[in-house]
Amino acid sequence: MFKFLKGFGSLLKNEIAIDLGTSSTLIYVKGKGIVIDEPSVVSVDLYTGKTISCGAEAKRMLGKTPETVVAKRPMKDGVIADFEMVQEMIIYLLNKVLEKNLFVRPVVLIAVPSGITDVERRAVRDAAILAGVQKVHMVAEPVASAVGLGLPIEEPVGNMVIDIGGGTTEIAVISLSGIVVNKSIRIAGDEMDEAISSYIREKYRVAIGEQTAEEIKINLGNAFPTFPEEKIEVRGRDLVSGTPKTIEISSTEVRNALRGVLNEIVFTLKKALEQTPPELLSDIIDRGIYLTGGGSMLKGLADLLMEEINILIKTTEYPRNCVVLGAGKILENLDKYNQILIASSKTMVKRTEFID
């Protein structure tokens, strides 16, 4: 009878892990795996204040809306930029996930940037609670990423992870279930897009939209000159005449455009290595550094980092999923990983050096 009641109770219990990212939001449901992978975009009717759409549908509206509608990303640099829109997005995504179990308020584990402030962390928690969540746990993104990779973070061994998302780059050394060295910079995939837009605007006097810049990054973006030269046509608005204009841009030009952003990431990685204790650094040299996150999919990035620091950089097949898979694994074993949750909620800010 007890087993039956316990099993029945688990059916009524919704446990969800969320990677609330600047570019995309991924949701993991306990027992089901990843069920949502949607762009972090919301569109709203300015007259009524009602949400029109979220996710992929809203992203298609970016830069194409009339004056009565706004479509934008409510997350900026890994944290909440528009509280109400994030709340609407969470409600929308939870409704898609929970389906028939809407009357059961879920327990949620949210992965957040390691450089998040107390105010920003409270904003994330409040948005989730107001969206109908019963209880909110939090974990630092690099820790979740390490768990998702299957690294032995609870052992006295140095595990180093570089997680490059849309809004932040997280670089952490983890040992004995804690962050020993941590660097968090708000330079990542979005800044790559902005660098490409700026380059085209300055060189060709042509304005392009953020989705066009992202497409250029995906198609031509590269960090290391080992790939064959490629070119594509890009359409935008001539800043002088105001008329439509088509230009041709090469992969070499895109690499040059990204140089400043990549230099910041390399500089931050070197600073993290400088502050790593010698014994843990020895482990890292032996084991390599793990590269994850959507921003890490830039072609040649691992080659660039290896040339700069002379340490093996390891990649994974699905880098965008590491954080949410790790958060899901933590959710499945909350008792085992309780120390991680306490560390991320109480001492994370003290252990983190935030680089503006």
Image (cartoon, rainbow, N blue to C red):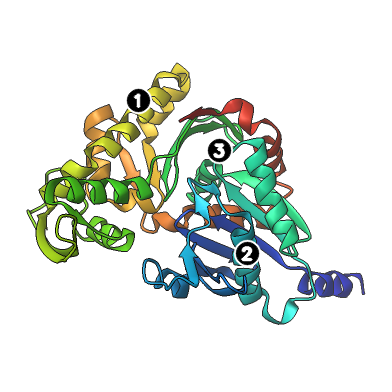
Residue under numbered circle 1: 270
Q: CA distance from mark 1 to mark 2?
A: 36 Å
Tell me if 251 is positioned left or right of 211 in this view: left
Question: Could you tell me residue 269's position as x and y percent?
Answer: 37, 30
Vertical order, 277 against 246 (above or below)? above
Tell me if 311 is positioned left or right of 137 in this view: left
Q: Secondary structure at mark 3?
A: loop
Residue under numbered circle 2: 90
Residue under numbered circle 3: 114
Q: Three-letter amino acid code at disc 3? A: Ser
Question: Could you tell me residue 120's position as x and y percent?
Answer: 63, 42
User: Residue 298: which disc?
Assistant: none
Vertical order, 307 against 300 (above or below)? above
Q: Three-letter amino acid code at disc 2? A: Ile
Q: CA distance from mark 3 to mark 2?
A: 21 Å
Q: Secondary structure at mark 1?
A: helix
Q: Nearer the viewer, mark 3 or mark 2?
A: 2
* Residue 225, visible in the rendered structure: yes
Q: Secondary structure at mark 2?
A: helix
Mark 3 and 2 residues: CB-CB less than 8 Å, in contact?
no
Tell me if 265 is positioned left or right of 5 in this view: left
Res 18 → quadrant: bottom right
Question: Could you tell me residue 320's position as x and y percent?
Answer: 42, 56
Q: Hey, which residue is sitting farthest right in the picture?
A: 1
Q: Quadrant of the C terminus?
A: top left
Tell me if 80 is positioned left or right of 166 in this view: right
Looking at the image, tell me whether mark 1 or mark 2 is earlier in sequence order: 2
Q: CA distance from mark 1 to mark 3?
A: 18 Å
